Image (cartoon, coloured by chain):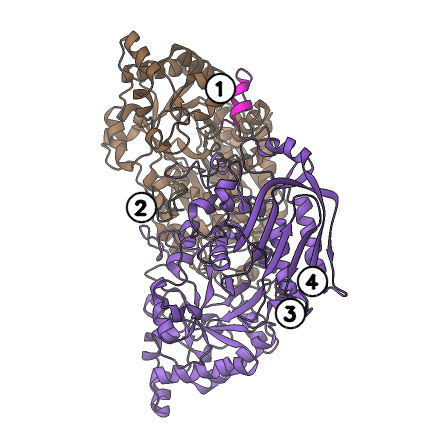
Chain colours: A purple, B brown
């Protein structure tokens, strides 16, 4: 263990900011300049390093050389020329695993069961030019450390340098689940956009891609066992995710430390299945849609029908087989009861089975979850399944809180594990106006816009008892895509989704021991935003450049 | 004159929508399919057609061939194969000017004094394959007609076709000023982004690019007479508009029917001048900024100082010479009086001149406006100059209403001409959250987000008497760029800025005689948005594709 001193960022760097995001749990950083030797190399002291670790080293080298990020200060890099000239040169970074650690690929480590992954690492960058060292218990930990290492460096006039040597970091995430959700059903996103988003996620140490792949509007997921679903339910033959696409995405994700949690939202949000299986639907495109759904088109699975139970269960079995990770969401939000009340077949089936609608829903869900569990997966659901419907679920089912941050306490009271995805903090689509037609004065249902500051002030443990705290696995920011497409993907997501990445990695307090706060965070967020831009992500600017170059000068109380 | 029948769009096209934006004032459209002959050509019956008209024809041909827009219906173009196969082919469009019309370039016509430009045109597309005709009083009118013509066409399987022959259009704008404002000072936009924005503006017949080029954060405008302003006041030597850039922009704009109205905001919003001329400033970067400015940094011109009056007047003379058009804005918004109250030099100068601060402001403004008038320009100001400061201005000064749509009546009461730019309808930056640091719970000052629907319902003549109506020249949507850069330019502007384009082109009633309304407009706006995307503008999606393919199916009352 390193001896770590308390560290105050703004005090230590009056002329700049420490460019790390998320900020490590524990860190001791100096203020000596250190340049990167033109001979700089990264070595791995492993007999047979896994190929994804070698790729990660290569990518890190690429970022070091191509980020070309000038410091965010007035005068930019010109400010540093003399200091850089006088600085020692760093020639190498040496990676090693701690004694006795098992050597797996990053990909293997990244998809282990949630809570069993080792992401911790220690990074030491001396000021005197001697080798930097990165150690960890797993290749995944090494990957996190490489990510941190790559964020230290600026460039000016072909000189690559950092400003805070010596640095000693001992880092480990506060929460095991740090996600981002993308809806690819309201509007379609080509696989390249998803890959690009995964890359950006990895830069801020997010580790779960929650892929809300299908919904009532379209069914882009092509499945060998159910080819008709995408064939008839996708927006077009080009707007699909083939099995090869899915494999590319999950493989790319795992190699950069990200688990893919796929969601097939059921039994609501399934109208797109009606294109191939109208016989499984109730209130199929019924009018007015607002009586039968929260948004158009209406249509839900008739879960009272044994054929529908069989179909959906087989669907989840098929999906489960395509995924390396253990998390699969069966959805379960916004079920509209009118659809069942008005459906003669549902009512007849309830009558003949002697079940209530809720009992039938419970049976349906247990069946789909059973299929997942049989495939070694952990089922995940939206909060209504346990708060509104009281469906009986396995103890280790994970519940995603979305309607309000206040609902976590109710889920915790039922002793389920929690993913924090509250709309009042984490919904990236809010505030863009109502997209439903014929409503000139309406605002978005979850107004106002959720700023990065709002997301950053989220308390994962609010309203929970100490004993309930361990139920919180982490959380995620989410993009529902009624008003998003590849055209605005980067700008609506980044850098905002980095806010929760720090909340769930660093936890309540930063390395200084003080609670995370937006004032300290803003200059660092500018920095990672500019770095993202240098890496090809069209992240939105947070402020005028005048402000970005003058840390905290545009604070309200400056 | 054509005899025009009343026309109901939704009634005539149950399977689609008429893809025109803005919708012409008068139109009679059929429902016959017509395909574009592979030999299709556009001819101009003029002895020496101006080069920009030839270029416009070439661009139109390019769009016809490259838009490749499939119809927004379920099944897309597959729906139309039989109808297209059976359709007649159009071989030519013939352009001509009406007898006696003067033959000027589009560029010449586009920068004529506001109110003296002729943009009207008549377009006839027969259904039988005989030549289509486009006539106008000016090349600018021909350009508008070409724009309309290009919007009719869809493509499927290499077949280019329209669905609404025969069509007879007689069109002319309701208002002469149809603008879009871009702030290039909070964050910088390379000239290529401006050119790209001008192109998109021309597609919806916007005709004034209001270029808010400088502000307190940066001074990117390079002027031969005042090189120090950009040299020291721009964000970097790369973030400037050189005289050549400005000429390229104004030349490109004029050739596609757009006048460039440059704004050097004075005497507030000028802190960036302090980098080269601190001697002209009051409250220069004073702290706390919130006492001295609406946003950081504080700093205003000391207009009581004769040297400042001389400088600013010479600055406007220099700027005026670089612009082909007649409109130049001297700004005048958000003047902070504390800056002058707390400045000893200002107070001494007022004492020695015997003027009040307001009298001195009036004198300053008259001087800068005098310089513009001497160069043949028409000065433009923000509303505070006449509502808060009662500065005496020339009768033909144009006043931009921005604080509230309610303020137009007060400006009209003073008998000034009006450009409608109200924040409560037209500010594109609203609703994205507070960008000032240290304010986790704050929303943007002009929340909520101004949807296209909101902008579309703007009434240019609200609260005005019949006799005041002629004072309204038109209006503009505006992008202030605290939170914008090239990364989100297209998605924050388009297709929203098309809303006011139709409000000010088509006016209160559409070709059917009914008032413009969002229900009818939405499918057409989807169409122009998709067309923009085909032409390389990353416009934001308005709804899930499911909705875009089913006109009005996602309306609230569907």
Pair 2/1: label in front:
1
Pair 4/2: label in front:
4
Q: Secondary structure at mark 4?
A: helix
* Vertical relation: B43 (above or below) A228: above
Question: In the rendered structure, the residue with mark 4 lies on which chain?
Answer: A
Q: Quadrant of residue A339?
A: bottom left
Q: Where is mark 3, residue-wise?
A: A108
Mark 2 nearby-residue class (10 Å; few <14, some 14–19, many ≥20)? few
Have a look at marks 3 and 4 and say if they share a chain: yes
Pair 1/3: label in front:
3
Looking at the image, which is closer to me, B414 or A555? A555
Q: Secondary structure at mark 3?
A: helix
Q: Where is mark 2, residue-wise?
A: B515
**Span of residues in magenta:** B219-234
Number of the label disc, if any, that sits on residue B319:
1
Q: CA distance from mark 2 to mark 1?
A: 41 Å
- Residue sitting at 56 percent across and 33 percent down? B191
């Amino acid at each position: 263990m390193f001896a770590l001193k308390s560290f105050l960022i703004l005090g230590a760097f009056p002329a700049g900011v420490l460019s790390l995001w998320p900020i490590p749990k524990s860190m001791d950083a100096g203020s000596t300049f250190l340049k990167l030797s033109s001979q700089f190399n990264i070595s791995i002291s492993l007999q047979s390093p896994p190929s994804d670790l070698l790729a990660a080293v290569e990518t890190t080298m690429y970022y070091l050389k191509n980020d070309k990020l000038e410091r965010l200060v007035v005068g930019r890099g010109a400010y540093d020329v003399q200091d850089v000239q006088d600085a020692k040169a760093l020639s190498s970074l040496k990676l090693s695993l701690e004694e006795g650690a098992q050597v797996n690929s990053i990909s293997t480590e990244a998809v282990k069961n949630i809570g069993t992954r080792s992401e911790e690492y220690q990074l030491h960058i001396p000021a005197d030019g001697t080798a930097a060292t990165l150690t960890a218990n797993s290749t995944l930990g090494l990957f996190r450390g490489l990510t941190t290492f790559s964020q230290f460096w600026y460039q000016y006039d072909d000189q690559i340098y950092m400003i805070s040597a010596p640095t000693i970091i001992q880092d480990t995430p506060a929460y095991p689940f740090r996600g981002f959700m993308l809806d690819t059903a309201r509007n379609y996103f080509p696989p390249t956009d998803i890959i690009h988003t995964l890359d950006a996620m990895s830069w801020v140490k997010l580790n779960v891609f929650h892929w809300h792949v299908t919904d009532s509007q379209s069914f882009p997921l092509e499945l060998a066992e159910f080819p008709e679903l995408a064939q008839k339910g996708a927006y077009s033959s080009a707007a699909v995710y083939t099995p090869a696409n899915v494999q590319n995405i999950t493989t790319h994700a795992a190699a950069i430390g990200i688990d893919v949690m796929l969601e097939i939202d059921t039994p609501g949000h399934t109208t797109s299945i009606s294109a191939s299986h109208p016989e499984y639907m109730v209130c199929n495109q019924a009018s007015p849609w607002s009586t039968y759904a929260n948004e158009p088109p209406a249509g839900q699975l008739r879960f009272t029908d044994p054929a529908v139970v069989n179909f959906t269960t087989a669907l989840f079995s098929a999906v489960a087989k395509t995924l390396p990770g253990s998390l699969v969401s069966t959805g379960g939000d916004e079920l509209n009861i009118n659809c069942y009340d008005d459906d003669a077949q549902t009512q007849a089936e309830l009558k003949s089975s002697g079940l209530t609608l809720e009992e039938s829903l419970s049976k349906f869900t247990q069946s789909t979850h059973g299929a997942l569990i049989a495939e070694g997966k952990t089922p995940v659901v939206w909060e209504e399944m346990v708060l509104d419907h009281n469906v009986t679920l396995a103890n280790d089912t994970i519940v995603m809180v979305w309607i309000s941050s206040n609902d976590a306490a109710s889920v915790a009271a039922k002793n389920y594990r929690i993913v924090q995805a509250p709309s009042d903090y984490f919904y990236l689509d809010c505030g863009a106006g109502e997209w439903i037609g014929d409503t000139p004065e309406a605002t978005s249902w979850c107004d106002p816009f959720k700023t990065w500051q709002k997301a950053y002030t989220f308390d994962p443990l609010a309203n929970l008892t100490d004993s309930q705290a361990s139920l919180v696995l982490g959380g995620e920011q989410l993009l529902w895509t009624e008003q998003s497409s590849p055209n605005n993907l980067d700008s609506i997501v980044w850098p905002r989704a980095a806010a929760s990445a720090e909340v769930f990695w660093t936890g309540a307090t930063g390395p200084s021991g003080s609670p995370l706060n937006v004032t300290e965070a803003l200059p660092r967020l500018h920095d990672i935003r500019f770095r993202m831009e240098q890496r090809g992500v069209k992240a939105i600017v947070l402020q005028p450049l005048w402000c970005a170059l003058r840390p905290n000068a545009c604070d309200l109380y400056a």
